[in-house]
Image (cartoon, grey):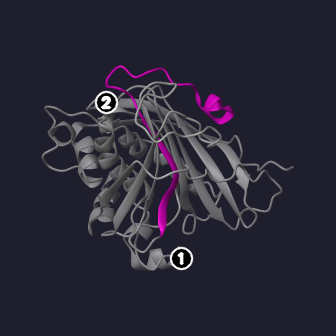
Amino acid sequence: MTTSPWQGRALGTRTVSWTARDAILYALAVGAPADRLDLVYEERLRVLPTFALTLAQWAPDALGTLGAFDVTTAVHGSQRLLVRRPLEPEGELTTTARVARVLDKGSAAVFDVEVTCPSFTATWSVFAPGVGGFGGDRGPSAPRRPDGPAGHTLTVATHARQAALYRLLGDRHAMHIDPGAARAAGMPRPFLHGLCTLAASLLPLADALGAHPAALVELDARFAAPVFPGDRLTLRGWTTDGDRADGDRADQDRTGPNDRGGTAVRFEASAADGRTVLSGARARFAPGVPNLPDLPDQKEQHDA
């Protein structure tokens, strides 16, 4: 089996900073209503944990700039996030990135770009057509949908300006705003950032679980199909006692703490035409903020 020369490549270190204005803009961009003062008002602000992903967006962009793949055709395949401590309303972090893994999908490759800092570990999986076939590991299969009916069925409403607004947070890839760039990427029109869809889904999901969205401590999801601004999504969730990403452990359709504490849920989202847009997703919310439980490092997660 051959290993990609990109595997293990260091992508450098970057110090990132943010203000309450940035965190509030993020909350509004992913769908927080104006009356959620704890998400949109600086006097009461609790920063959404997925805001961290905007701070680390530089890393997958840096890999594309180095020539690992064609940035006009590569797409965001999946995302993982481990939260180690909550983000303050304003602050500064030093983040370090590397290519943790490169999977060979035949005609394409998947690059796992891992960003670490004391507050979180985030991993982008970038699906890159045209650079596979090097004889490497194909990687694990997609997680299975839990057995049994969903315990939660929710609606996630997106709006026509959402992609344009989310771009202001740092991911300014043209395919999300320019019809020509979207067509070049194989899409009929500009589409919503996967991370925006994911964060928007977590808001009603946390409410349904009786959790605060700022209490998110773990997240993992695959972007199965594009979401177009204005799409209305149906989200289905299965609350679980298990916390394994591989789905080998039986899930139970009830809300309750799992073996690491907090509430775990598996979920998926689909568009009105039946397309599954988020698949194999799971999240865990701690009982409260700010005292988050210690989380295992990324290697322990992969080995679980």
Q: Position of residue 122 (x, y in %)?
A: 51, 39
Is residue 172 shown left or right of residue 289? right
Is residue 143 shown left or right of residue 175? right
Q: Position of residue 294 (x, y in %)?
A: 48, 20
Task: Decide whether residue 89 is among the magenta residues.
Answer: no
Please tell me which residue is depicted at 54% across the width and 68% down the height of the picture. 72
* First along the sequence among labels 1 and 2: 2
Q: Nearer the viewer, residue 100 or 248?
A: 248
| Mark 1 vs mark 2, CA separation in Å | 38 Å
Considering only vertical position in the picture, is 76 above or below 38?
Answer: below
Is residue 27 shown left or right of residue 253? left
Q: Which residues are magenta?
A: 275-304
Q: Which mark is residue 91?
A: 2
Please give the residue where the numbered disc 1 appears in the rendered image: 186
Considering only vertical position in the picture, is 90 above or below 9?
Answer: above
User: What residue type is disc 1 on?
Assistant: Gly
Q: Nearer the viewer, residue 24 or 38?
A: 38
User: What residue type is disc 2 on?
Assistant: Gly
Q: Position of residue 86 (x, y in %)?
A: 35, 28
Which tag is nearer the camera, tag 1 or tag 2? 1
